[in-house]
């Protein structure tokens, strides 16, 4: 089973994943966590180029292609082989981030972006995607307060992140059976409990 977590800046995805992995392992599942961009040696090198605050001149099309290059590598090198072995793969972001950030955020042509994403993934779609949804301003404040990594992708104007959120919510509407929305504007512990509940229920359904 292939599960992805999505969400805006400050939604807390990254802090939740290690606890979810541990929880599922305690239940006896074999789970492999990974993240995008990154998750492979090539992908981590591409991540540095994309995120480097020195690269402010990067064009949205360059950015879109770099994300796809990192993605093609992780799909072939990490995700597909593990899924073939029956492992549950949980990814911190996947192609929905490209549609939300490069498609909606940067307002690149959505059909073209979808075609690129399809090329990069070879058509591999998640079985379940969880959106940690949060008001944009609340998320950005939270991110600053928690002293999280601050990179080039955090340096856009607020309107950019608002478009990203609209994008996510439209994707949820268009493909409701794949998505579960969890409100991230609650105590961390409450979000974690809800995530555990929905994940376990969905995994049991699939097996
Ligand atoms: P994160 O690791 O803190 O979630 O940061 C990754 C950043 O990269 C975040 O701002 C979202 C962005 N991103 C895209 O814009 N497109 C993509 O395809 C992916 C995977 C991430």
Image: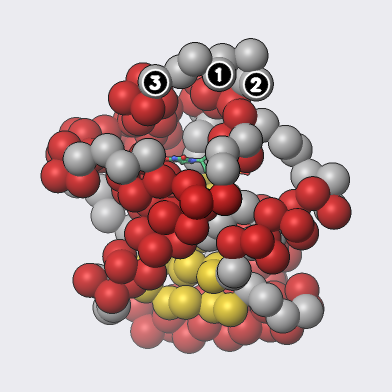
The residue singled out by tag 1 in the image is: 56
Residue 39 percent location from the top left of the image: 54, 34
Q: Does the CB distance between marks 2 and 1 fall below 8 Å?
A: yes
The residue singled out by tag 2 in the image is: 53
Q: Which of marks 2 and 3 is nearer the N terminus?
A: 2
Q: How crowded is mark 3: few (under 14 residues within 10 Å), some or many (20 or more)?
A: few
Position of residue 129 relative to residue 181, above or below, is above
Q: Residue at 43% of width from left, 77% of height from top? A: 180
Q: Determine the image quadrant of residue 206.
A: bottom left
Q: Residue at 62% of width from left, 35% of height from top? A: 155
Residue 106 percent location from the top left of the image: 37, 39
Q: Is mark 2 on a helix, strand or loop?
A: loop
Left or right of residue 93, residue 20 in this image: right
Closest to the observer: 16 or 86?
Answer: 16
Closest to the observer: 170 or 3?
Answer: 170
Q: Which mark is residue 28?
A: none
The residue singled out by tag 3 in the image is: 59
Q: Residues within 10 Å of mark 2 (few under 14, many from 20)?
A: some
Does the numbered disc 1 mark a residue whose Cβ is under 8 Å from ligand 1?
A: no
């Amino acid at each position: 089973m292939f599960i992805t977590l999505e969400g805006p800046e400050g939604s807390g995805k990254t802090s939740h994943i290690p606890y979810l992995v541990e929880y599922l392992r305690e239940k006896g599942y074999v789970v492999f966590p990974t993240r995008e961009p990154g998750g492979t040696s090539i992908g981590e090198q591409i991540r540095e180029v994309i995120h480097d605050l020195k690269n402010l001149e990067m064009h949205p099309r360059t950015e879109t292609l770099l994300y796809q290059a990192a993605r093609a590598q992780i799909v072939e090198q990490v995700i597909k082989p593990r899924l073939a072995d029956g492992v549950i793969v949980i990814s911190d972001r996947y192609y929905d981030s490209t549609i939300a950030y490069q498609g909606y955020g940067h307002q690149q042509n959505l059909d073209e972006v979808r075609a690129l994403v399809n090329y990069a993934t070879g058509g591999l779609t998640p079985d379940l995607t969880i959106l940690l949804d949060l008001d944009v301003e609340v998320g950005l404040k939270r991110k600053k307060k928690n002293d999280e990594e601050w990179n080039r992708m955090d340096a856009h104007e607020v309107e950019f992140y608002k478009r990203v959120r609209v994008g996510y919510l439209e994707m949820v509407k268009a493909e409701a059976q794949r998505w579960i929305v969890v409100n991230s504007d609650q105590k961390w512990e409450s979000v974690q409990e809800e995530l555990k509940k929905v994940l376990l229920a969905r995994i049991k359904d699939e097996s």
